[in-house]
Image: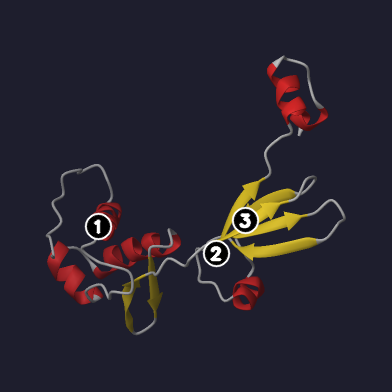
């Protein structure tokens, strides 16, 4: 259901308020995954704001990963991919960052989606689409947990 923007926060920029309204509508299921949002012109009329305001609001939602945009087409609510579990090996480091354009193309991911860089103890590096994996860490061995709980520093606790 389309709702007119009520400028209830005069100190908050209009594009942020429009983004808030659209974000809430997506969260409430008023716009569902894969659904096309109203055109920019319709959003301008609906919220009584400028085209630039609408474009800035949509850019925020795109960067948050909530919508996709393409030139000449209306914004669409992004589909959330299924996640697979990825076990982080002992001695590995996990870094979250934004991908380069080449990485984005190689992984087939959209703008605004971060990557996870896994740096293994053996020096190999793997880059994964952060939306498609759930990183799990093996639980600590009981003696390590006891050592940390008792206040004795364990080498792993310094990491």
Q: Residue at x 57, y 76 (%)?
A: 108
Nearer mark to the viewer, of 1 and 2: 2
Seen from the viewer's position, the closer of residues 19 and 126 is 126
Mark earlier in primary sequence (3, 2): 3
The residue under label 3 is: 97
Q: How is the image coloured?
A: secondary structure
| CA gap, disc 3 and disc 1 | 27 Å
Question: Callout 1: helix, strand or loop?
Answer: helix
Q: Residue at x 23, y 58 (%)?
A: 25
Seen from the viewer's position, the closer of residues 123 and 57 is 123
| CA gap, disc 1 and disc 2 | 29 Å
**159 on left or right of 131:** right
The residue under label 2 is: 132
Mark earlier in primary sequence (3, 1): 1
Does residue 48 appear in the picture of this structure? no
Where 149 falls versus 131 (above or below)? above
**83 on left or right of 24:** right
Crowd tier of the residue under label 2, counting other residues whose Cα lies within 10 Å: few below 14, some 14–19, many 20 or above:
some
Where 135 falls versus 32 (above or below)? above
Question: Callout 2: helix, strand or loop?
Answer: loop
Does residue 128 appear in the picture of this structure? yes
| Residue 12 on image: x %, y % | 27, 45
Q: Residue at x 78, y 16 (%)?
A: 152
Mark earlier in primary sequence (1, 2): 1
Residue 18 disc label: 1
Residue 37 quadrant = bottom left
């Amino acid at each position: 259901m389309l709702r007119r923007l009520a400028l209830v926060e005069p100190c908050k920029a209009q594009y942020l308020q429009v983004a808030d309204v659209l974000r809430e509508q997506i969260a409430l299921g008023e716009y569902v995954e894969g659904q096309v949002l109203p055109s920019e012109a319709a959003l301008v009329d609906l919220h009584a704001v400028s085209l630039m305001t609408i474009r800035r609001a949509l850019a925020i939602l795109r960067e948050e990963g909530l919508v996709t945009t393409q030139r000449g087409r209306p914004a669409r609510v992004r589909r959330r991919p299924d996640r697979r579990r990825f076990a982080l090996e002992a001695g590995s480091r996990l870094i979250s960052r934004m991908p380069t354009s080449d990485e984005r193309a190689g992984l087939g991911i959209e703008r605004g989606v971060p990557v996870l860089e896994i740096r293994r103890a053996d020096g190999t590096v793997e880059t994964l689409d952060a939306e498609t994996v759930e990183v799990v860490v093996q639980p600590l061995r009981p003696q390590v947990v006891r050592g940390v709980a008792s206040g004795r520093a364990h080498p792993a606790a310094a990491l």
